[in-house]
């Protein structure tokens, strides 16, 4: 039986995006790791399997291969996979274009919204692992 994870993986190509998300999560009881490249993301997932993956910025900035790998990981490990976009440039895609995100967030986001997402994602994985 798999055990549930206590890690959150933040993916962002811009350091500012990583800093903002990390600062919002600094008081959580979960480990937060970050990646700014596809290689770092895959290495982090192997080293510390996350229960929540947050992809910041436009998903078009990441390769289709990485998005597919993240979706496969999320499906296999019952992790939650969400995209975070800026309110200045939200690009709502058609459902058939969705690369497999479980949900979408719009920055700026409040600590309460992020805390709720984290708790929901962790509970989801814990329940799925227990079944």
Image (cartoon, rainbow, N blue to C red):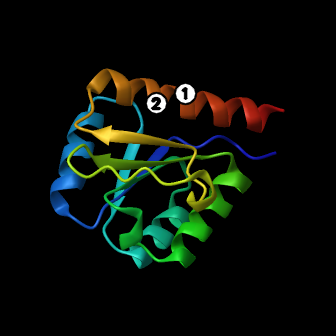
Specify the quadrant that holds the N terminus: top right
CA distance separating discs 2 and 1: 5 Å
- Element carrying mark 2: helix
For the point 35% across and 74% down, which residue is it? 37
For the point 63% across and 58% down, which residue is it? 96
The residue sitting at the front extreme is 94
Q: Where is residue 16 drawn, in percent x and y?
A: 15, 55
For the point 28% across and 26% down, which residue is it? 111
Asked if the residue under mark 1 is in contact with the one under mark 2, i.e. CB atoms within 8 Å, the reply is yes
* Residue at the spot of label 1: 120
Q: Crowdedness of circle 2 by 10 Å Cα count: few (<14), some, many (20+)?
A: some
Give the camera-side residue of 126 and 66: 66
- Element carrying mark 1: helix
The residue sitting at the left extreme is 16
For the point 63% across and 54% down, which residue is it? 74
Task: From the viewer's perspective, tell me whether residue 17 is left or right of residue 103.
Answer: left
Q: Where is residue 52 drawn, in percent x and y?
A: 51, 45
Q: Where is residue 91 drawn, in percent x and y?
A: 37, 53
């Amino acid at each position: 039986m798999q055990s549930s994870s206590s890690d959150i993986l933040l993916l962002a190509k811009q350091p500012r995006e990583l800093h903002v998300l990390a600062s919002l999560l600094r008081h959580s009881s979960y480990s937060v790791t970050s990646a700014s490249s596809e290689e770092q993301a895959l290495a982090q997932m192997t080293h510390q399997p996350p229960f929540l993956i947050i992809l910041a910025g436009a998903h078009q900035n990441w390769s289709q291969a990485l998005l597919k790998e993240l979706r496969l990981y999320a499906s296999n490990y019952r992790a939650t996979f969400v995209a975070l976009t800026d309110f200045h440039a939200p690009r709502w895609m058609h459902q058939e274009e969705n690369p497999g995100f479980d949900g979408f967030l719009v920055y700026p986001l409040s600590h309460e919204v992020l805390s709720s997402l984290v708790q929901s994602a962790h509970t989801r994985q814990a329940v799925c692992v227990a079944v």
